[in-house]
Amino acid sequence: MNAITKNEQNALARAVLEIDVNNHPGVMSHVVGLFSRRAYNVEGILCLPVGDGSQSRIWLMLIEDQRLPQMMKQVEKLEDVIALRRHTADHAVFQDLESFFRP
Amino acid sequence: MTETLTGAQITIRLLERQGIRTVAGIPGGAILPIYDALGQSTAIHHVLARHEQGAGFMAQGMARATGQPAVCLASSGPGATNLLTAIADAKLDSIPLVAITGQVPKAMIGTDAFQEVDTYGLSIPITKHNFLVSSAEELLSVIPRAFEIAASGRPGPVLVDIPKDVQTQAIEIGEWPEPGCALRAPAADSALIEEATAMINAAERPILYLGGGVVHSGAAESALELAQKAGLPTVMTLMALGTMPVDHPLSLGMLGMHGARYTNLALDECDLLIAVGARFDDRATGKVAAFCPQAKIIHIDIDPAELDKIKTAHIGITADVQEALSQMLPAVSANERKIWGERITALKAEFPFEMPDAENPRSHFGLIRTVAACLDNEATITTDVGQHQMWVSQAYPLRRPRQWLTSGGLGTMGFGVPAAIGAALAEPQRTVVCFTGDGSILMNIQELVTAAEENVNIKIVLIDNATLGLVHQQQTLFYGERLFASQFKSSPDFIKIAQGFGIAAIDLDLTPNPCAALMEAIARPGPCLIHASIDAEQKVYPMVPPGAANRDMIGA
């Protein structure tokens, strides 16, 4: 699944999820654990505290497949998830980061 | 007025305030402060299990019998890892459980300290939610919240990991938080309810499909009313058995892998499937693409993630099923559905469920029917996992929700005995019967001494075929009869074992009149093991081969 080339990956539809969570140790494990235990790769992760730091915002970049709607429902069920929004792959959040990810 | 209390004392006081009166567990170094506080409690009875998994299943027995969250305790490291199976089991069957584990002091977390394990990390995928408590103050919000989460919406297990220094930290308490209770689920969308009702009214061959959610929601009566008013033949999942009495004229019993032929064939013909608190488990549906191929689907569940997970519903309703059913009841039209009813009757006549040798109490079905004849609907039935479990699900006349406690989703051998102890502790007025097998009982045999110590009124019916029966059956049917690792070359003397643990035991193999012996053993208060050998060649039939469509059943 992870062996596909960069070009192939770009050809696949991507999705960006924006997730507001309570900020405490363990919340990232809860979120990404939902993906890893279903062998669903997370292509990109960004996370920073929001406001006074009691909450964080997690941005996930994913390759869209038919499991995504179920994944979103599972994420929304987590006690520490306050809100979930879905964006298209062209969302700006990951776009200016490429310079940090050159091989 | 304020008082100064330690985290351990606060924990126990919060459990008392939750109304917890019985807990099961095993102490150890990292939870000793909590045990010290528990020892001072006059309100809470502690049941000392002999393995933490036993404690977890005792708590499950209490929770399944009453519907209220129950509590188990374990120490750090191996204490916590031993609990995990019981917690995972509670997750898959949506059982409200609060597991409290001790943890090494905060400063030692991450140092590979003695009996340190990442309990928080280990329990993430098998709990509804979990907490690692970092201060005594936090306990005041975490403990009530744990109960609230366990009981709200789709119930489930919550783990609270408490480092030892948090247990010993003393703080001043001025005000106590309210106990955590189940929050009301958001109301069902009335437009969808209306649409669903219209769909039921328009259907010609509808079937009502009840799952464990009907039990959790206390909706059995409403489901029965709906079925009767709208003339809905009704199937139940393993978890829902008892919600409609099996001998009700509209009952088609259990569906799926070991359901009756007429049940699965009726589903094949239905034009509307009304799934209530059910999750289209693979043991229920068989090959999903071939499940109810002609049917439109109404799916009602409190967990929105269950809708469209396996089968896309034409109408998906997120709601507490009791509330949804009571909204539907007045709007659904009374309908006898004579033609569909006649078709069902014909299917029942043409493809009946066979119970060979049911008159003989030395056969598996005969034994189960004889035990049932000694009891009324007030009895609670637990099982272990295997052939005996499926035979009991097929043959025992279950007629009451929460009468039937079985490990469905996880299918955990070793569930039956400790769950029976828990059920008997929670409802001492009932007789609790645990059907088990010679494979399963050995997985938590140590709890027999707990049963003796607590003198619980449980009757353990041990159906002994000296094999791992379902493995034996699958190897016989699907692996060219290559029997490997499924037959026990030596078996213990279960009578001596039971007696050695301090409980009464009878061997039906040696009694000239098994019916009279059973009657006497069941009527005598206190724990008792009843041993009965059966033929190892007996199969659970009918059976849908794994991966096949439900219509392609084999056997009987």
Image (spheres, coloured by chain):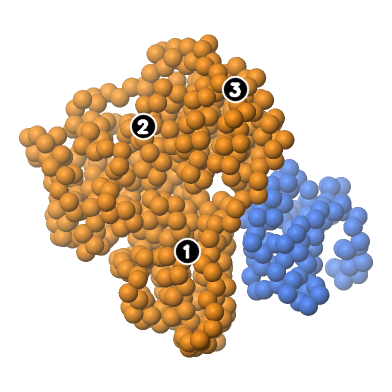
Chain colours: A blue, B orange
Q: Name the residue under label 2.
A: B394
Q: Mark 1 points at which residue?
A: B98
Q: Are marks 2 and 3 on the same chain?
A: yes
Residue B233 x/y as whole percent: 49, 23
Q: Which chain carries label 1?
A: B
User: Of the residues under marks 1 and 3, which one precedes in the sequence?
Assistant: 1
Q: How far apart are marks 2 and 3 (CA)?
A: 32 Å
Q: Which chain carries label 2?
A: B
Task: Look at the numbered disc 1 and give the secondary structure of its residue.
Answer: strand
User: Of the residues under marks 2 and 3, which one precedes in the sequence?
Assistant: 3
Q: Which chain carries label 3?
A: B
Q: Distance between the residues labelled 1 and 3?
A: 43 Å
Circle 1 crowding by C-alpha within 10 Å: few under 14, some 14–19, many from 20:
many
Circle 3 crowding by C-alpha within 10 Å: few under 14, some 14–19, many from 20:
some
Residue at the limit of the structure toward the left, as seen here: B512
Please determine whether, in this image, residue B88 is positioned above or below residue B292.
below
Q: Are marks 2 and 1 on the same chain?
A: yes
Q: Which amino acid does label 3 sit on?
A: Ser
The answer to the question of whether label 2 and label 3 lie on touching residues, with beta carbons closer than 8 A, is no
In the foreground, A5 or A78:
A78
Q: Name the residue under label 3.
A: B333
Q: What residue type is labelled 1?
A: Val
* Residue appearing at x 54%, y 79% in the figure: B175
